[in-house]
Amino acid sequence: MASQEIYYVPDGSKWPIVGTLSLFITFMGGAMMFNNAPGGLYVLILGLATLVYMFAGWFADVISESLAGKYSKQVDVSFRMGMGWFILSEVMFFAAFFGALYYARAFSIPWLGGEGQGLHNGTHEFLWPAFQAMWPMNVMPDPSNYTQYKDTIPAFGIPAVNTALLLTSGVTCTFAHWALKKEQRKALCLWLAATVLLGIIFVGFQAQEYVHAYNDLDLTLNSGIYGSTFFMLTGFHGFHVTMGALMLAVILFRSLKGHFSKKDHFAFEAVAWYWHFVDVVWLGLFIFVYWV
Amino acid sequence: MSTLAHDDHHDHKPTGLKRWFFSTNHKDIGTLYLIFALVMFFVGGSMAMIIRAELFQPGLQFVDPQFYNSMVTVHALIMIFGAVMPAGVGLANWMIPLMVGAPDMALPRMNNMSFWILPFAFALLISTLFMEGGGPAGGWTMYPPLVLQTGNAFPFLIFAIHFLGVSSIMGAINIIATVFNMRAPGMTLMKMPLFVWTWVITSFLLIASLPVLAGGVTMLLTDKYFGTSFFDAAGGGDPVLFQHIFWFFGHPEVYILALPAFGIVSQVIPAFARKPLFGYASMVYATASIAILSFFVWAHHMFTVGLPIKGELFFMYATMLIAVPTGVKVFNWIATMWKGAMTFETPMLFSIAFVILFTIGGFSGLMLGITPVDFQYHDTYFVVAHFHYVLLTGAIFALMSAVYYWLPKWTGYMYDERLGKIHFWLSLISSNVLFFPQHFLGLAGMPRRIPDYNIQFADFNAISSIGGFAYGITQLLFVYIVIKCALGGKKAKPRVWEGAKGLEWTVPSPAPFHTFETPPKLTKEMLEH
């Protein structure tokens, strides 16, 4: 509920419109590239560069306002709600891809294999009678359009190591938070650095796994629904880990500069929430994409 | 950007282009949203005019079928994402801080970005009409494999959807933070005006459903350009999977359009019946129930695709269940009017028409929700009639009601009541001439999304087109009324309507640039609803 202080309403700012333009240019560039229009890549790069400029400028404003003491407790709560609900929207984005995975495994593949649908199953009977339901599915109903792969990535190799890495990074992140609350600046920076490092190693392993999948296993985005769900889920997750590591690195940089106090460190917490969210998504991936 | 010196910004108003492009003021941003929505209402409306012109007679007259299909597709996308949703967000922006006693939206800069994305996203979308291969023509539902045949427009369509999603999610987060964090002391949750309640529940729907659509269209993109097989049975996927994902978003989306309308009507009817809203708490619970149930009914849009029978039954019964809280709401609106000292100014007329016509649309929805019956009605004009009753005579009538109700608060002048009433009656008659015959067309088997039809459907189509043109022309009158009111007229009092309750009527008309910079002291009367 409202406090009696005046809620800080910022004056006009150019960053929202810069952000809008940057996204617009990025989308334009992306769409141009898909259409093989000349110059698409340059437009895309310009858009992304503007996006980075916007983030840097917008956050710089927010940080200086925060350091100037303009933010009351109530403003802080608005930020917290904003971040929390943003993370929920991210959860729902991943839900779409998990949904696709479950749907393929529970419905579309068994149906293509002839299960269900009363007395006869037309798709199976008339289109692909030879298709047998299985998971991982490495013989496609119509193999002509899709790459058959030799093998999948086993759960208890690098993915298990990655699970350990990410869970550990969650712990180091919490240690950093405890250090911050006890005002141990050096420990804060060290634990944060460790978290960033673990995140980078995780992404490195993922990249190596992708190279292995593409080069040695012929497992690609084109490998039917297994390849589609595998790469889209792990790919979007990997992208989120990269973003999270980047955010943590910014927080580390700010910690080194002496930002944040025992009581006032919302940016730290927001990034920590995000990091834990990425962690939880990974657990879902490890279980449902790699393991069972 | 900001200096310490600016803190005292009581009535200092930025000027020129900066005022609009850099705005952090909920009233200015609300105005931008509302004007944008009105412009898009006419852009989408002109596409509807092309559709009705083509359908005036059987045979192909004016446009080629591909262009006709892209008109159907883009009309829907514009009306949903460009007209009804932004109008609702515009009202939320203008009114929620005034209604809960907040100085502004919780996150004012993000608020500006939520708005400014819209014109750019629609630039992406509408530009596709001029591209090689034409605009998207696979219907706003974008079902694969059809939509994958779209030409150069395809990535623009997908990115426009992503872009609009970003805007709506940021808007929704802002509304939630405003409602839960910015209320004046004493404005407890169950004292909030119902419009605020419906918007906060709508925001939950937006946050939970739009990212799912974003995921679904991303899969379309990778299916087309990166060789994935989410929606291709030859690779183990299923085109029906897209329909599940789409309608998991799409059904909550229906309530994203409808719930704010419910909120508006729940403000207007008590004001002109001069009675408190009947069953306030039950209204809140009914709204929440509708929102929760809306996540469990999506497959009623796809009864004919070959779902397992148990699934069809589940989704049929879940759909029937939504009629219960909706019935509670309709009952409460009528009970509010019961023995009220009613007057019939334009906002009230639109709201009463909403209650009746939305209920008709609701009932045809129930018919469509009954699985065996839907096999007959699916993809016919009956569906078109149904959702235009709930969206045009439903959502848009409520939005019109809201504009008339709050216009004097925004401009400081009374609108022309006589013209408002003419606008109402012409809209009421023309929209029913437009859509009622479409029920008969659908029951007789006329399919939707086809530019030509059998001669037996000619008469009803001609009637429907006449209604359509009349409705379109009538809306020009609305623009005239709004502009006239913005330019001058009878001065509006702070409490514009005698029976209106709520904090927004305690500030002057027009509402000053900044309101409630310090939380207002709320008295008991201020909290009545």
Image (cartoon, coloured by chain):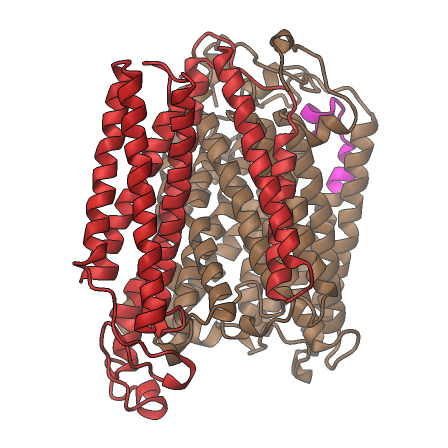
Residue drawn at x 38%, y 27% as measured from the top left? A252
Chain corresponding to red in the figure: A
Instruction: Please say whether residue A100 is visible from this viewpoint.
Output: no
Quadrant of the rendered structure where residue B13 is?
Answer: top right
Q: Which residue occupies the foreground of this view, A194 or B306?
A: A194
Compared with A291, A104 (above or below) is: below
Pinpoint residue B336: horizontal percent, then vertical percent: 48, 33
How many marks overall? Answer: 0
Is B288 colored magenta in this rendering?
no
Left or right of B365 in this view: A219:
left
Residue B34, given in percent of the width and then of the height, sits at 67, 38
Q: Quadrant of the N terminus of chain B?
A: top right
Chain coloured brown:
B
Q: In the displayed structure, would residue B66 be above or below residue A245?
A: below
Q: A93 or A262, which is in the foreground?
A: A262
Q: Say which residue appears at 70% left-offset and 49% top-offset.
A: B40
Q: Left of B219 or right of it: where is B271?
A: right
Q: Nearer the viewer, residue B353 or B171?
A: B171
Name the residue nearer the viewer: B145 or B289. B145
B417 part of magenta stretch? yes
- Residue in view at x 57 percent, y 12 percent: B517
Where residue A260 appears, x then y in whole percent? 39, 17
Query: Looking at the image, is B518 positioned above or below residue B415?
Result: above
Q: Residue at x 40, y 57 (%)?
A: B248
Residues rendered magenta in the picture: B406-421
Q: Main secondary structure of the magenta part?
A: helix
